[in-house]
Amino acid sequence: MKRAERAARKVLQRLEEAGFQAYFVGGCVRDQLMKRPVSDYDVATNARPEEVQALFSHTIPTGIQHGTVTVWLEETSVEVTTFRVESRYKDSRRPEHVHFVDSLYLDLARRDFTINAIAQDLNGRYYDPFHGMDDLASNMLRTVGEPFERFQEDALRLLRAVRFAAQLGMRIEKETYEAICTHAGLLSRIAVERIRTEWDKILLSNAAYGIQLLLKTGLFPYVFFDIEVPSPQILSSLSLIEKLPKKLTIRYAALCDRMGIREQEADRWLRKLRHGKKFVRDILSVLRALPTGDQSICDLLNWEDTTWRNHLYHVGKEAAEHAAQILSVYEPNDQATMVYNLYRAKISQQPIWTMCDLKIDGHRLLNEFPDLERKGWLIGEILKHLVGEVLRHPHKNDPYALLCEARDFLEKNRGSQE
Ligand code: ATP
Ligand code: MG
């Protein structure tokens, strides 16, 4: 038994010993039934948040007003949420109020889809009032209760439906599907951060199927904003994204590349999705590292060695590695294979990736040329010059050769140093 499961069982045990009801609920029950790896364990209980806090020595009041307490146990965490119902949803967003209740049934009834509304007790007994197990068996995603109402209550569920369908490879039940199409516009009311969380999970799973569903249901513009709808041909090529590692930077870059979303547009889109600055920068570097379109693939095959070295230095090692990984899953035609092999070879031959890879540093320059003490700015200039030299002539990355080069540089620029 894994540590997370062991910890969750202990939480259930302790709650039961204290006289409360406690169950595994949501994703962990669903994933275990589907024989998928369980990521985290959620527990539902009739104990109030204060009572949960009193029973365990390490707790964090994660979302205490909504009834969630995180329990730390055996170096892992378990989310424990008090049975609750939600009332008065405002503008199809989060509920205005939650009420704690004593009934497991009511807690399951407020959940989004039948497959997420199954509970299991410590003895392994299932509680499945909305027949989620039948839906799992027939691979069908269906809302708990009336789909029109459930999507009007919380429009994020529209996108969650696509997320679960893509992630779990399920079909969406007819009425649920029709309700999504009818209510697609409501997604505009949802905070973009919540949209992004679900969309990122789609991208990390079966992205091609997910995007196809977004297009068919009318949800596409609420995730992609003003980005052009991909052609059927592009859409079918998106399936190769699945072959890539489950890493967002790589998958975003591959998606933008395939969909013809170039740097500037990608930058705008990623910022609209409120992704962090560094994350956006990393994706743009991978995009820059990739050859774009047939024309530049031909150019790339004819590049001089120095052009290659400058290009790789400019995009950085990580982006170059990611780009090579993306190229490796492209349709294996002669040209793609050639570009991939070339890319790999150039990466392995790259003499330096950053200034730190030079065989001398600022201290060594100061030792050699003590006058530089008074002209600190010049050290950076010299190092920049040395980088350019090594990119042109890799054999020059040697302490002695670099010092000679630095001396020449200082001689030549004597006039501008005063
Ligand atoms: P994952 O493994 O991807 O985390 P999950 O099923 O645990 O999947 P979460 O988003 O963590 O998904 O939500 C936990 C549970 O809370 C869901 O299984 C569902 O029962 C319920 N839930 C979450 N969001 C909503 C929502 N917007 N409306 C109704 N129920 C929800
Ligand atoms: Mg979860």
Image (cartoon, grey):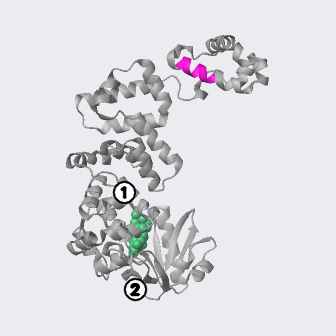
Is any atom of residue 45 visible in this view? no
Amino acid, disc 2: Leu
Label at residue 106: 2
Q: Quadrant of the N terminus?
A: bottom left
Q: Residues within 10 Å of mark 1 (few under 14, many from 20)?
A: few
Residue lying at 75% horizontally and 16% vertically, measured from the top left: 369
Q: Amino acid at mark 1?
A: Phe
Q: Which residues are magenta?
A: 383-390
Looking at the image, is 151 positioned above or below residue 384?
A: below
Is 124 inside the magenta-drawn segment? no
* Residue 225 - label: 1
Of labels 2 and 1, earlier in sequence is 2
> Which image quarter holds the C terminus?
top right
Let me know if residue 18 appears in the view. yes
Residue 308 in which image quadrant: top left
Tell me the residue at 26%/48% (across/down).
239
Give the x, y percent position of residue 250. Answer: 40, 44
* Dominant secondary structure of the residues highlighted in magenta in the image: helix
